[in-house]
Amino acid sequence: MRSKTECFAGPFSPVLVIDFSGQPRAPARMNPLKTAPTRSGCKVFIDWAKPSSSQTPVKKYDVEIQGINGIFYSLSKVCNFGETSFFCAVSMKYLTSEPFNLVNGVPVVARGSAKNSYGWSKFSHVD
């Protein structure tokens, strides 16, 4: 941009580049949680759909599980969520201890979030 009069045109201002891609959308859906026995005990299997495309690629995901107190806690300590990770298996032994304190028979509630170079998305909808 520059200003111009009848007799003179000023210099151009510096170029401003604006990228409208912004933060990614939340993971499209958290699939129903499945519980299954394994050799090392019962596990909860969590998977989700990749968020709808954004111009800036997703670099990382996070999944949180709702504790018995209603607060959500991250699974990042037990699951390695990279840019292509859409799955995690968590031991029920882990979920029945601090900070989750879940008990058998209580539904396991999960929500997910995606991160790109602009920051974290909102969390996926919890039904």
Image: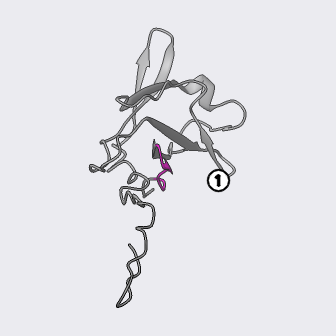
Q: Is residue 39 left or right of residue 51?
A: right
Which residue in the protein does label 1 denote? 70
Say what amino acid the circle numbered 1 marks.
Gly
* Residue found at the far right of this picture: 98
Closest to the observer: 118 or 16?
16
Please give the name of the residue rendered at 45% of the width and 56% of the height, measured from the top-left corner: 126
What's the image's color scheme? one colour
Task: Give the quadrant of residue 89.
Answer: top left
Residue 57's place in the image compared with 90, above or below, is: below
Q: Position of residue 117 (x, y in %)?
A: 47, 43
Q: Secondary structure at mark 1?
A: loop
Type of secondary structure dominating the magenta stretch: loop
Q: Position of residue 17 (x, y in %)?
A: 39, 58
Residue 41's place in the image compared with 94, above or below, is: above
Assign the N terminus to one quadrant of the image.
bottom left
* Residue found at the far front of this picture: 7
Please give the name of the residue rendered at 45% of the width and 61% of the height, measured from the top-left corner: 14
Q: Residues within 10 Å of mark 1 (few under 14, many from 20)?
A: few
Residue 46's place in the image compared with 1, above or below, is: above
* Residue found at the far left of this picture: 53
* Residue found at the far bottom of this picture: 6
Q: Is residue 120 rendered magenta in the image?
A: yes
| Span of residues in magenta | 117-123
Q: Position of residue 58 (x, y in %)?
A: 38, 40
Please give the name of the residue rendered at 72% of the width and 33% of the height, measured from the top-left corner: 98
Q: Is residue 59 rendered magenta in the image?
A: no
Q: Is residue 53 left or right of residue 75?
A: left
Assign the C terminus to one quadrant of the image.
bottom left
Closest to the observer: 122 or 100?
122
Residue 87's place in the image compared with 67, above or below, is: above
